[in-house]
Amino acid sequence: MSEHGKRRILLVEDEPSLVLTLSDRLLSEGYEVATAGDGESGFNKAIEEPFDLIVLDVMLPRKSGLDVCRDLRQHGLQTPILMLTAKGQVVDKVVGLKLGADDYLTKPFDMMELMARIESLLRRARNTIGPAAGSYVFGDIRADFRRAEVLRAGQEVELSALELKLLQHFIEHRGEVLSRDHLLDEVWGYDATPFTRTVDVHVASLRQKLETKPSRPEFILTVHGQGYKFVG
Ligand code: CA
């Protein structure tokens, strides 16, 4: 929802005439609209700004709509996605829904039909968890970085600003081995400190708050002699 209380829609579509028609229509229906003309910029916009819904074309330059959809879901974004597929691309529909799209519409479509689908998706989203842009779920943890809020099994977990930043960095680099020096640079922001132990202390604290068994962590793993790795 925008500051004016309008719902925000991201339109990822590369056909200029369709972008124009759709934007006009959405604006006249009272939505706020942002557009992206290729998959890569669409993905970036979707993770950088909060949207209530994403209309995503499948055939896009630079990154296909299917890849965008999959990557957004892997990133933890739960914003409803309405896919636009070309006529006859039955496979895309099935794959799209599997990759986490909420609905699809085949081109060419009726504008009324699109508006109805959008409204229905927005209604559904409101009934479940609401727009959860910027959140990431692992285990029974839900981290919402826009709201600086972490829930564990629905209960709020108190994290310091630094712990939150550390967690966000881990999530953004999940699967990568991160050295203590790297973490100090990226999370603490000073290039050289004699106290790489600082990292260990904060990691231990995060584990206490997020892991079921902090001594045998499932998510924030120690990679001996190298650093840490987040898996989740
Ligand atoms: Ca296209």
Image (cartoon, rainbow, N blue to C red):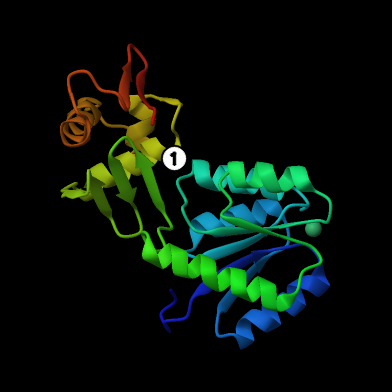
Q: Residue at x 63, y 75 (%)?
A: 115
Residue 10: image quadrant is: bottom right
The residue located at (65%, 66%) in the rendering is 11
Q: Is residue 21 visible?
A: yes
24 vs 224: above or below: below
Question: On screen, 161 above or below 32?
Answer: above
Q: Is residue 27 left or right of residue 126?
A: right
Q: Is residue 115 above or below residue 190?
A: below
Return the residue found at the far bottom.
28
Q: Quadrant of residue 174?
A: top left
- State whether residue 191 appears in this view: no
Q: Position of residue 39 (x, y in %)?
A: 69, 52
Mark 1 surroundings: few (<14), some (14-19) or many (≥20) residues within 10 A: few
Ligand 1 is found in which quarter of the picture? bottom right
> Which amino acid is tagged 1?
Glu
Quadrant that contains the C terminus: top left
Query: What residue would you read off at disc 1?
Result: 172
In terms of depth relative to the viewer, which is nearer, 37 or 186?
Answer: 37
When asked about the image quadrant of residue 226, the answer is: top left
The foreground one among 23 and 85 is 85
